C-alpha cells in the first residue's frame, strides 16, 4: 500500500512533482481542491478553509473581525460532522461569540481537527499521494508513508511566482515570504512540528539543483 505526502515551499514546483509522481505510480492525487471539497462535505465552512490558507494579504485584526462576522458555530463533535450532511449539523453553541467556547482560536482548532480527520480518511485506503495541509504531520506515525519535502532557493521561487502569476518583484517577494511564514506557523501550531525540520521527511529535494524529471524518478524509485 503506497502512501506519499508532499510538502513544498511556494514556487518550488512541489505540486507539479506530486502530480507527476502520482501519475507514474498510479496513485490517487489529493491536492488542496480535493481536500477542500471533502472538508466542505464534512461540515467545515468556506470561511474556515480560507483562514487556513491565509498568506498575509490582510492584517490579523481584519482577519479576526471578518471571521467573527461570518464563521458559523462548530458542530457538537468533529466525528458527528463527518457522519452528517452540513445542512443537518445542529447549532448547540449559539454562535462564535457564545461564552460556551473561546472566540475564533478554539473554533479554528476544531475546524483544523476536522480537516485532519478528512485527510486521514482520504489516506485510509492507501495508494494515495497527498499534497500539503499538514499531511506530513498528520500521517507521520504511519510506517508505510513516504514523506517528501520540495524546496528551492528563495530568489528562484520569487522568479517562479513572478512568471506564474504575473507579479512585480516586490509583490512576488512578499507573497513568498508570507507563504513561508504561514506554513511554518500552521505546522507548529496545529501539528507541533517544525515545517523545515529535515527529520520530519524521508526525502528533502532542492529543485534549484535537480530538474523536475529527475526528482520524479527519484521519488518513484524510492517506492520501488
Image (cartoon, rainbow, N blue to C red):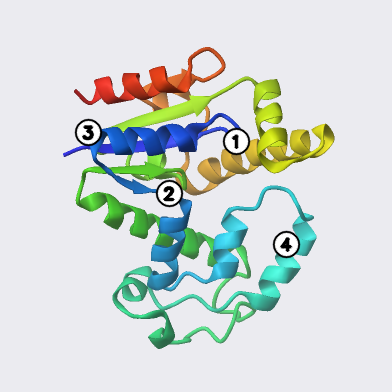
Task: Give the CA distance from mark 2 to mark 1.
Answer: 14 Å
Which one is earlier in the sequence, the residue at label 2 or at label 3? 2
Q: Which residue is mark 3?
A: 143
Camera-near label (2 vs 4) is 2
Q: Name the image quarter holding residue 49.
A: bottom right
Q: Position of residue 148 (x, y in %)?
A: 39, 29
Camera-near label (2 vs 3) is 2
Q: Are marks 1 and 3 in contact (CB under 8 Å)?
A: no
Q: Position of residue 203 (x, y in %)?
A: 38, 22
The residue shown at (45%, 44%) is 134
The residue shown at (71%, 22%) is 155
Quadrant placement of the N terminus: top left
Q: Name the image quarter holding residue 144.
A: top left
Q: Which residue is mark 1?
A: 10
Q: Which residue is mark 2?
A: 31
On screen, residue 139 versus residue 172, left or right, reads left
Task: Give the CA distance from mark 2 to mark 4.
Answer: 25 Å
Task: Give the CA distance from mark 2 to mark 3.
Answer: 22 Å
Q: Which residue is mark 4?
A: 63
Which one is earlier in the sequence, the residue at label 1 or at label 3? 1
Task: Give the CA distance from mark 1 to mark 4.
Answer: 22 Å
Task: Give the CA distance from mark 1 to mark 3.
Answer: 27 Å
Which one is earlier in the sequence, the residue at label 1 or at label 4? 1
On screen, residue 111 versus residue 124, left or right, reads right
Task: Give the CA distance from mark 3 to mark 4.
Answer: 38 Å
Which one is earlier in the sequence, the residue at label 2 or at label 4? 2
**Above or below, 163 relative to 224:** below
| Kind of element beneath mark 4 | helix
Which one is earlier in the sequence, the residue at label 3 or at label 4? 4
Closer-to-camera residue (181/57):
57
| Kind of element beneath mark 2 | loop
Amino acid at each position: 500500500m503506497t502512501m506519499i505526502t508532499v510538502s513544498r515551499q511556494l514556487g518550488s514546483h512541489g505540486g507539479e512533482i506530486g502530480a507527476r509522481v502520482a501519475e507514474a505510480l498510479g496513485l490517487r492525487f489529493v491536492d488542496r481542491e480535493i481536500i477542500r471539497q471533502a472538508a466542505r462535505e464534512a461540515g467545515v465552512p468556506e470561511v474556515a478553509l480560507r483562514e487556513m490558507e491565509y498568506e498575509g494579504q490582510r492584517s490579523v485584526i481584519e482577519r479576526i473581525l471578518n471571521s467573527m462576522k461570518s464563521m458559523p458555530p462548530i458542530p457538537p463533535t468533529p466525528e458527528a460532522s463527518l457522519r452528517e450532511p452540513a445542512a443537518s449539523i445542529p447549532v448547540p453553541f449559539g454562535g462564535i461569540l457564545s461564552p460556551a467556547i473561546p472566540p475564533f482560536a478554539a473554533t479554528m482548532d476544531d475546524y483544523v481537527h476536522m480537516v485532519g480527520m478528512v485527510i486521514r480518511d482520504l489516506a485510509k485506503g492507501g495508494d494515495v499521494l497527498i499534497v500539503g495541509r499538514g499531511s506530513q504531520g498528520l500521517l507521520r506515525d504511519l510506517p508505510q508513508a513516504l514523506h517528501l519535502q520540495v524546496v528551492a532557493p528563495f530568489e528562484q521561487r520569487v522568479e517562479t511566482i513572478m512568471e506564474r502569476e504575473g507579479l512585480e518583484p516586490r509583490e512576488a517577494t512578499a507573497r513568498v515570504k508570507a507563504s513561508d511564514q504561514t506554513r511554518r506557523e500552521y505546522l507548529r501550531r496545529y501539528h507541533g512540528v517544525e515545517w523545515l525540520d529535515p527529520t520530519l521527511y524521508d526525502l528533502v529535494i532542492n529543485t534549484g539543483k535537480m530538474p523536475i524529471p529527475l526528482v520524479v524518478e527519484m521519488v518513484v524509485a524510492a517506492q520501488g
